[in-house]
Image (cartoon, coloured by chain):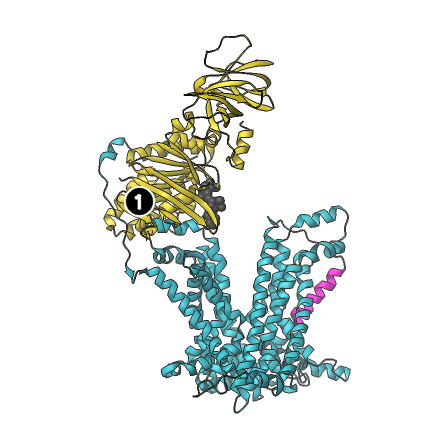
Chain colours: A yellow, B cyan
Amino acid sequence: MPDVAVKNLRKDFGGLTVLHEVSFTIKDGEFFTLLGPSGCGKSTTLSCLAGLEQPTSGSIAVGDTVLVDDSSNKFVPPEERNLGMVFQSYALWPHMTLAENLAMPLNIRKVSKAEQKTLIHDALDKVGLAHLAHRYPHQLSGGQQQRVALARALVYSPKVLLLDEPLSNLDAKLREQARVWLKRLQSELGITTVYVTHDQEEALAMSDRIAVMSNGHMLQVAPPHEIYERPATAEVAAFIGRSNFIDGTVVSALGGAATVRLEESGETINVAVSDDAATGDLVTVAFRPEKVFLTNRGAEVPADAIVLNADIMTTSYVGSRYEYDLKYGSKTLLVDSTTGGLTGAVRLVVPAEAVRLYPRADVVSKDVAELMAVTH
Amino acid sequence: MTTIPETRPAAQATVPRPEYPAPKYRRILGADRSQLLFWATIIILALLVLAPVVPTLYQSVLDRPLYEEGGLFTTENFTRLFTEANFGSVALNTILFAVMTTVMTLLIAVPMAIVVIRTNIPGRKFFGAAMQWPFFISSLILGFGWITMYGPAGFASVEVRRVLGFLPWDLYTLPGMALTEAVALAPIAYLFCANALRNSDASLEGAAQTVGAGPFRILWSVIIPMLRPPIVYSSVLVFSMSIETLSIPLLYGQPVDITVFATFLYKNGLQSVDPDYGILGAASVIILLVTVLLVAVQAKLLKDARRFVSVRGKATRPRLLDLGWIKWLAVAFITIYVVIGALIPILGLVMRSFTKIFTPLQNPLLSLTMGNYQRIFEFPAYVGSIRNSLIVAGVGAVLVSVLAVVAVVVSKRSTFRYRKVIEYLALAPQAMPGLIIGIGLFWAFAFLPFNMGSLLQGTIWAIIIGFGLRALPSAFGSISPAVMQIGEELDNAARVNGADWLKMFLRILVKLLTPAFVAAMVLTFVVMMKEYSPAIFLGSADTAVIGTTMLELWVQGNTGSVAALATIQIVITAVFVGIAGLLTKGKKDA
Ligand SMILES: Nc1ncnc2c1ncn2[C@@H]1O[C@H](COP(=O)(O)OP(=O)(O)OP(=O)(O)O)[C@@H](O)[C@H]1O
Ligand SMILES: [Mg+2]
């Protein structure tokens, strides 16, 4: 199964640009997830892949087959792309039984009746519903319908599988089971899969690689671990997991290190930087609540760690850990800790490798800004 | 709870899976076959809609009949229309008639809607259903019925004159025409008001009630303002319908020489020995302009009204107001409308069809006869008109509904560049009075090169085209909501699975739309059964329909046979609607 290459994909609706020159490549057999807040253009990207929307410009190719290319004016309609797709509403045809639903793509492909029978049985068997082949969609539960939709998308062995929030209509418990099951099925089949979700946990758990989108831009494309540990932008850091953000200014920069004065307190900290930072740059310092720890004044800390003086405002016990709200200047910082019962003035210790430095995030969209303001 | 099945052992993945390549669809001249269907649809619609309009426009500025050689352009037709032809007073009559009809329609419909939907009068369900009757009966038949009962020599009139010594009303006046027309159109206004009242937010009224407002205060301050959008909309609708209507003005106005737009066309086009085509064209163009304008206003209002409704959010069951003793007044009012307005005239007409003489001066039961029916069945021409009506309505219902389904689906569910145009074209005949469709098509057939028009002129196909055009907007309107209810993801799923647009349409949408299609066919059948005005110009001796035959018999003074034909038409419609109802119900149960 071939790679999927998307180059400079752009989509306008009327005057509104919904996708801005998005490019990415999906490797053969990869589970690739488009993740982002509602309205960021995930479904639009998927529709362009499926051929249900015609991109304004850009190109899409699967292996050697060019599906869309604005320079040569090529557009392959959805029916000739041979992709499989599962829709959010499942889109099972209500007037056909499950077997008939699955037979439709095979009929169109002129597969012989005998072969159809085995293919349909195999596909339904794979999702555990072979015994319900002669039921109508409305006689199934939501979870069963979702699996039929998947079987229908797989029955003709498409080149690529496209999934648009297929689990979002399931209840929480079922969703978690379905996640595991779907991931296993995908890796067994080895089918290249593009998965759309706004649920970061789902994305982190299932994907080989994740593309984080926001406002029609692709912010970062990387494996889950990297997305979480090294978010490319403040927005990604805010959207994936929880993060604390403190604004600051670079007062001096030398080689791989920079000194940043924090706006909240006037304290200065030393941070390792990968890119070049220049004196006077406005920056945002970010760290995750579970990567830091709290100590009493006077306790020993690693030499290169950043130490901030803060006051504990509230504590909440959430089972596996304690969550502390710290007052730091006018900001509230969130810290996870395994020790309970801390109160009053504490030192917040941020190990050097837990700190990320970003350009001051004034490009952050409104909903992300809200996320950053209340990170818990 | 459903459990997630174990997947097969991983070993299976290593088996290479067979390929089932996507189908290739053939292209004709670079366009796929769905595009061809889109273009075919828009071309057929454009031909149908433009066929009556273009020749009319052309004729209006031509100095001689458009099929004669050597015509010159002129504006003289319009000048003559207003000077010689006395079109000014015709316009005034029309406006007076339309205004009176609109006012009376609202006076009947609005209180009726409030009382039936929002108060606790007895028999609400029955009255609600009774408001639908006129849909099944043409206003021509209603007019015959009214004359039979309340006309100068009508059954009721004679009795009243005998008792009082004089007759306190005169049907053959503008107010008389307007009253009958209002009775016929009230159900339409009622429908819009009733819908608004049903969808309205009961919490507003609840709030008013909790602060101690009585039922009349609530009526005045909460319910009436809510009705403003439907009242405005249905006023425009009723106004434009009464501007183009022919039946009542023809029946009542002819004997006393009151002429409105439609009867002007009728007189000038049909009754004069040597019709003045220039004047006919000019008058048609002016009437068309007025109706197009009104339909445009309607469309605008309807859009706004929808917005008005949709912001109200979820509908709650409205509370019923208690009017106290006044409710008996309300019941009396509705009963009078239903019984005197509709029931008595229709029953009178049926009675008339079975009697030799129909007057209170002699017991009608003593002169019972089948003679009126006999006469109809003796003359092949009359039997032929019944057969023609059935063929036109039957064939037309199928053709129009098919065209409407395709037009709706293309306009709502395709990426065709001109899909909006398709919708406008399909709805355009709303603005075209039946007579003008008739005149325009007549000219179009006469105008076609190589004498091609003669293939259609005077045939039943000409009638089917004319009536079909009239019925198309309602068929489109009845199918459109059904299409909107089908989730678009069903189409998309079919496309991704390998169906091109046409296959998707045939395998998915057609099946899902079957109930809506059947409903549209029933509706179209009824509409085309009632229709007659385009046939006045398009019909020939062989292609008369029930409506035109009734008019002919009426002019001959053969009222008994008119009544018989009317009864036959009512029975046909009732039987058809009844059977269709039974069939679709049986299907739903299965
Ligand atoms: N047909 C359309 N016309 C105009 N705007 C559209 C259309 N379809 C989508 N949009 C806009 O494009 C943007 C992206 O839409 P899209 O459906 O791709 O979002 P999404 O990321 O899938 O969101 P969600 O998670 O809510 O499904 C939205 O702002 C949406 O309003
Ligand atoms: Mg979406």
Q: Residue furthest bottom?
A: B273
Instruction: Say if disc 1 is inside 8 Å of ligand 1.
Output: no
Q: Would you say residue A141 is visible in this rendering? A: no
The residue depicted at 54 percent of the width and 79 percent of the height is: B284
**Residue B561 location in percent, x, y?**
55, 84
Q: Which image quarter holds the C terminus of chain B? A: bottom left
**Residue A52 location in percent, x, y?**
38, 49
Decide: is A356 above or below B524.
Answer: above
- The residue at which mark 1 appears reads as A61
Numbered disc 1: secondary structure: strand
Q: Amino acid at mark 1?
A: Ala
Q: Which secondary structure dominates the residues rendered in magenta? A: helix
Left or right: B160 in relation to B358: right
Front residue of B50/B531: it is B50
Q: Which image quarter holds the N terminus of chain B? A: top left
User: Which region shows up in magenta?
Assistant: B320-342
Front residue of B545/A22: it is A22
**Residue B14 location in percent, x, y?**
23, 34
Front residue of B116/A216: it is A216
